[in-house]
Amino acid sequence: MATAKQILILGAGFGGLASANLLRNSLQKEVCQITVIDKNQSFMMGLVNLWILSGTRRLENSQIALNKLESKGIKFLNDEIIKIDPSENSVTTKTNRNKVHYDYLIIALGADLAPKQIEGFEDNESCFNIYNVQQVPRLREKILALKSGRIIICIANIPYKCPPAPYEVSLIINDILIKNGTRDSIDLNIYVPTPISLPVAGAKMSQDVVNLLNEKHINFHPLHKIKKVLDKKTIEFENGVKTSFDVLIIIPNHQVPQIIKNSDLLRDGNQHWINVDKFTLRTKYKNVFAIGDVTEIRLDKTTTIPKAGIFAEGQAKVVSQQIINEITDNNNNKALTKFDGKGFCFMEVGDKKAGYIYADFYNESGPTTRLDPPSYEFYQKKLDFERSRLGEWLM
Ligand SMILES: Cc1cc2nc3c(=O)[nH]c(=O)nc-3n(C[C@H](O)[C@H](O)[C@H](O)COP(=O)(O)OP(=O)(O)OC[C@H]3O[C@@H](n4cnc5c(N)ncnc54)[C@H](O)[C@@H]3O)c2cc1C
């Protein structure tokens, strides 16, 4: 009997967990061993940050242990990956410089956050990184304690995870302030470096989003790229504007993980993320795939496939099916072996309502996007979105 193939998955986030489960559900243990490596011990969806902010969820009730993968026949290694060496088909982890060999490698390491790149941001008790879940409970307390003043939400740069999320944050904060009786005395602002709110979704949807903000008296400031936090209460932008804040919430710069920079998976110095084939998600190495936030799939000169869990999951399906077909020497589900560039998400607007965003980025006559009006039903579907994935991946 042939020896079992080794499938190694780097990262137990959206893409890694979806891949591991899809592969395990289709391939017997005798045919392949699946190993997932992650430095974290537990998984939580990024969208839960918003629920902790709104007060409908607590951090302690939201993280699920990754060693639950073991009961599904998926090996979980809780370690930090320090080297990827595709020429040797191996990956090295930090503990004892352990070398793990593979026949197939799926890189799903996501994006690293770099708040330190903003001068003056750290060590300021009025500044918060909303993408770091550890900071969200304290942010919520700070907002509830504020009686009057200015709250600023600031997108440091593009690309960043989940393009609608900063707008959801502003709408949820609006809701918190109304319920807290302080909305009339607190000015709510969002500053972005781009000319429109959602460049990746186009002018129409960007205007729809700004209309939602206008309805709630949230001030939208395009073309403001943060330069530095000047002092405890002032921020400066690259266009020379300086403005005051009582609470500053930042979506920090995103960057490719350092181990990818140290590998030869970036072809040249101008490449910031892993370039993959837009349909197969293969890297320049035939048995190495990369999916999700760690990749860049360019749509035109300025736009790329957004960094969002729904795309990481869609790409996981495509990569898994290709590996399944290769290992079983089959040509099953051919349509599932090509990424279709389609995705959706639910954009929260506060008061337990959400809009529905749909996007088709590979549409032959150009990318199309749509925002359906907020409703209670879409909010419920967002709750189901988390529940169903956790059920499939970790229960
Ligand atoms: C506030 C917020 C709201 C969001 N809302 C949505 C939404 O509504 N819908 C949606 O689709 N997406 C949403 N997203 C985006 C979504 O969370 C990400 O796009 C998605 O998690 C990307 O999946 P991934 O598999 O590429 O990476 P990740 O899920 O980030 O997983 C990467 C994993 O790699 C691990 N890792 C990294 N480096 C190493 C290393 N050296 N060694 C070991 N392990 C390592 C990390 O610990 C992590 O577990 C949201 C994100 C945020 C922050």
Image (cartoon, rainbow, N blue to C red):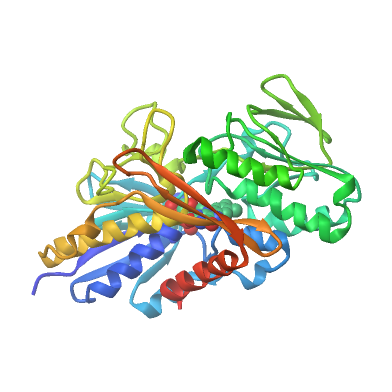
Say whether residue 283 is left or right of residue 304.
left
Q: Position of residue 388 (x, y in %)?
A: 47, 73
Taking the image as shown, residue 311 lies to the left or right of residue 237, namely: left
Give the answer, above or below, for where 266 lies relative to 63. above
The number of numbered discs placed on residues in the rendered structure image is: 0
Residue at left offset 41%, top offset 45%: 294
Q: Residue at x 22, y 69 (%)?
A: 32
Residue located at (83% from left, 61% from top): 179
Q: The N terminus appears in which quarter of the rendering? A: bottom left
Inspect this view and state whether residue 375 appears.
Answer: yes
Task: Look at the picture and state if 131 lies above or below 79.
Answer: above
Q: Nearer the viewer, residue 156 or 92?
A: 156
* Quadrant assignment, res 335: bottom left
> Residue 168: image x %, image y %?
64, 51
List x then y, in percent, for residue 121.
72, 37
Is 376 drawn above or below residue 169 in the view shown? below
In front: 82, or 229?
A: 229
Residue shown at the point (19%, 47%) measured from the top left: 286
Say whether residue 261 is left or right of residue 157. Answer: left
Residue sitting nearer the eye, 73 or 337: 337
- Quarter of the picture containing the C terminus is bottom left
Residue 337 percent coordinates (x, y) = 22, 56
Question: Can the viewer see residue 103 in this picture?
Answer: no
